[in-house]
Image (cartoon, grey):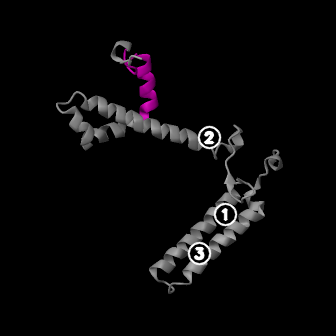
Amino acid sequence: MFNLFVAGLELCKDSKVFNQRLKNTVAKLEARQQKYEINSPPYVALSQQIDNTKNRFDKYGKANLLCGADGLPHLITDGRLSHAKEFIIPGVLFLYITGWIGWVGRGYLQAVSTSSKPAENEIIIDVPLALKFVASGFLWPIEALQQLNNKTLLAPDNEVTVSPR
């Protein structure tokens, strides 16, 4: 692979510390599980947690994630597309979702600012109006570019207050 040993990383599936971490985690859960009667709700819940833990570690191993000396998966953020699933895709998705939330909130605040009680509508949310903005918010990047081109995205300079210093 690509200079993994320089960074002190190795594939999680090959890491002794990673596999020991799995064994320790499962052993702790099994020790807790033995305190309960078989088929009791806590016993079943711990069984599910053990299965989920094993599945999670198995997925980390199959995903070719890289583990450090601590046995934990490390994200590689060096720009290589082979690591896109670890950082780039979740990062872009995060930016899209936060943009959606901001765009919907901006639209809602602009809409209620023209109502008869704008301050009250900021505190007590008009749910039908808010849902209308949420439903249309997924197109926020396109709408933002359109408003930027139409010069309606940003407030005019004469509407922006500047505090004296």
Based on the displayed image, in which of its 4 quarters is residue 146 positioned? top left
Under circle 1, the secondary element is helix
User: Nearest the camera: 5 or 163?
Assistant: 163
Quarter holding the C terminus?
top left
Q: Which residues are magenta?
A: 138-156
Examine the rendered structure and indicate whether residue 111 appears above or below residue 18: above
- Is 155 or 139 nearer to us in this picture? 155
Residue 77: image quadrant is: top right
Q: CA distance from mark 2 to mark 3?
A: 34 Å
Q: Amino acid at mark 3?
A: Leu
The mark nearer the N terminus, 1 or 2, is: 1
User: How far apart, in angstroms, are the residues tagged by discs 1 and 2?
Assistant: 22 Å
Tell me, yes or no, whether the two marked residues, 1 and 3, touch with CB atoms within 8 Å.
no
**Residue 119, x across and y down, in percent:** 23, 34
In the displayed orientation, state which residue is furthest to the front.
165
The CA span between labels 1 and 3 is: 17 Å
The residue lying at 69 percent from left, 39 percent from top is 81
Disc 2: which residue: 88
Please give the residue where the numbered disc 1 appears in the rendered image.
Answer: 58
Disc 2 element: helix
Position in image of residue 132 (x %, y %): 30, 38
Rendering coords of residue 130 (x, y %):
29, 40
Residue corresponding to mark 3: 29
The disc label shown at residue 38, or none: none
Is 5 positioned to the left or the right of 124 in the image? right
Q: What residue appears at the point 46 percent right and 39 percent down from the top-left corner? A: 98
Instruction: Kindly identify the amino acid type of the residue bearing the numbered disc 2.
Output: Ile
**Secondary structure predominantly adopted by residues drawn in magenta:** helix
Q: Are marks 2 and 3 in contact (CB under 8 Å)?
A: no
Q: Residues within 10 Å of mark 1 (few under 14, many from 20)?
A: some
Judge the density around disc 2: few (<14), some (14-19), many (≥20) Cα neighbours within 10 Å. Answer: some
